Image (cartoon, coloured by chain):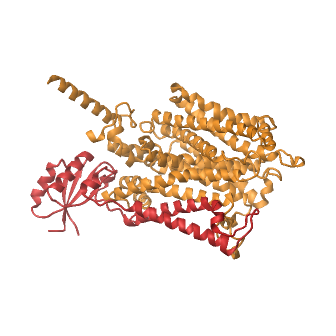
Amino acid sequence: MSSHYEAPIRKPLIIGDKNYHDVTVDVARPVEGRANKQWWIAFAIALAAFLWGVACVAYTVGTGIGTWGSNKTVGWAWDITNFVWWVGIGHAGTLISAVLLLFRQKWRMAINRSAEAMTIFSVIQAAMFPVFHMGRPWLAYWVMPIPNQFGSLWVNFNSPLLWDVFAISTYLSVSLVFWWTGLLPDFAMLRDRAITPFTKQVYGILSFGWSGRAKDWQRFEEVSLVLAGLATPLVLSVHTIVSFDFATSVIPGWHTTILPPYFVAGAIFSGFAMVNTLLIIMRKLSNLEAYITVQHIELMNIVIMITGSIVGVAYITELFIAWYSGVEYEQYAFINRATGPYWWSYWLMMTCNVISPQVMWFKKIRTSIMVSFIISIVVNIGMWFERFVIIVTSLHRDYLPSSWTMFQPTFVDAGFYIGTIGFFFVLFLLYSRSFPVIAQAEVKSIMKTSSEKYKKLHEAHDNHSHSEHNHH
Amino acid sequence: MSNKVLHVLYNDDDILMDAVRKTRAAHHHIEEVFTPFPVHGLDKAMGLAPTRLAIASFLYGLVGLSVATAMMRFIMIADWPQDIGGKPSFSYIQNMPAFVPVMFELTVFFAAHLMVITFYMRSRLWPFKQAENPDVRTTDDHFLMEIVVNGNENELIAFFQETGAVEVKVIEKH
């Protein structure tokens, strides 16, 4: 028992009188049970939004990019805003499973599976925008380094847009194998519980024949650790490179060295907010409150508060540097952001991203599930506007005043965006009913240190030995 | 005689660990242990050699770095040099700062994917592979130790019942 000791001041991560078998049953229940009415309603709405998006994309491909609101001056608008927003959301998953693994944070185990699922699904949404902005998506393979005679010239490795291709595809594929490797033992659990031959067959294929030998587990843990070590710089590199899309240009408001850390902090900020949004609903609908506890939500809120504050400092630094640089184009870009025609989006961004997370300083607020849910949505609205502000306000005031214009999104812009939200939720809802949404094997391994049941046993054991000591 | 094995089942990881130590001390050969989750220290207690996957991953990373360097040097400098934005492509080292992101990404790409593929190959994991855990409870809450039967079978069974096993079965292996 002594090897499983953990300081009593640490709150339990698994609530209730759970044993190993209870974990199995609780994680398998949403997969083995039938979907309830709420799930079907949510799925129908998501599917409708997705199909509307498909229609808008079909119209875009059939007619051309002119169906979007982008114009000659504002050549990048909703597409890249949505792209950066989705990639940003996709940062929390790997951060939770990789960085928190390196820091030995046991609370990651209840949420890493779903956070990684969210990462993969949102990076898929992100990739859609650049692909359809190409106009001829069937030529998307031209971004690969293929010899001149196959199409365009060799790709240009000086371009941050190409760096993005490599960063996003590495990130998506490494996140996918990290996720899948972790899923193998849990699929095996579902396989071994399956009653019908069909489910046994399906989970047998998905689990790659995982048997749980001691040697397999030794390799599994080494692979997880090394993947975490590789994914940590990878996750930081992805949004750094996304920020290079802007920072290497000569547009006022974009051409700044602060962009990489500022983008990374913003990505973690919005990603954790989205994890909170999804898990607050999922823990309720799938009866996982014993594993995804209020303490988990509180810790997520603390990360949101810290990264929100970093983002706030970055906004203020940008303003200061614009003034301090003495470059009148930079100064104008920032005055225009705050007081120009798009002032409302700037102040919406400031309120949602800098002010709203500050309420998390109060323990009562950060442990309130309702407030956490609302803030998590407010943060993602704010982060969408951050990208909108950076992209559209910097572009709409060209160097040539005769080119000055406004950006007006069309219904196709909106439809495509709504479609990706629908697609994301279609994937997440299907995942929540067919995948083990909690890394149950890992949760079982922290049972004896961190569950309420064993913490009570430790305590009883401690008190007992103390009183014994006093008698002698 | 030699194709007979014992399947000894436990329902607690601490009892399993004690049993593994006692079994090794009594010089019985542990063929395999199946567990539902990673039991820390089990590999050492069983005397398994450490895995070299991390070293393999480092080497794969070096391969990735080399591939990235060779590819970009060929494309950007040797095969089709272009003067982009007033920055001519005379040598790789001069233009290298622009190539660092892709060098990094491909290092990670090779290190991660080739390590995972090596892991799947070494542990024989792939789609349509049949599972080999002898009891379905080993992915739920039971721990199974497989022992080769040598000498007195009854004595061996009695020994394992002493170690806190919940079940001891004799299996004829073919």
Q: Nearer the viewer, residue A197 or A370?
A: A370
| Residue A34 image point, x, y percent | 47, 46
Q: Nearer the viewer, residue B7 or A329?
A: A329
- Which residue is farthest top? A471
In the picture, the quarter occupied by the C terminus of chain B is bottom left
Look at the picture and state if A456 lies above or below A330.
Answer: above
| Residue A400 image point, x, y percent | 87, 49
Which chain gets the red colouring? B
Picture residue at 59% right of the left edge, 30% below the top? A358
In the picture, the quarter occupied by the N terminus of chain B is bottom left
Picture residue at 19% right of the left edge, 49% below the top? B165
- Which residue is farthest bottom? A149
- Which residue is farthest right? A402
| Residue A23 image point, x, y percent | 37, 43
Q: Nearer the viewer, residue A299 or A279?
A: A299
Picture residue at 44% right of the left edge, 49% below the top? A436
In the image, taking residue A355 as reference, residue A392 lies left or right, namely: right
In the image, taking residue B104 as reference, residue A351 lies left or right, namely: right
Look at the picture and state if B21 lies above or below A297.
Answer: below
Q: How many marks?
A: 0
Which chain gets the orange colouring? A
Choose top left, top right, bottom left or bottom right for residue B148.
Answer: bottom left
| Residue A10 image point, x, y percent | 38, 33
In the image, taking residue B173 as reference, residue B157 lies left or right, namely: left
In the image, taking residue A394 as reference, residue A292 lies left or right, namely: left
Residue A179 in view here = no
Look at the picture and state if B63 lies above or below A197.
Answer: below
Q: Nearer the viewer, residue A118 or B49?
A: B49
Residue B153 in view here = yes
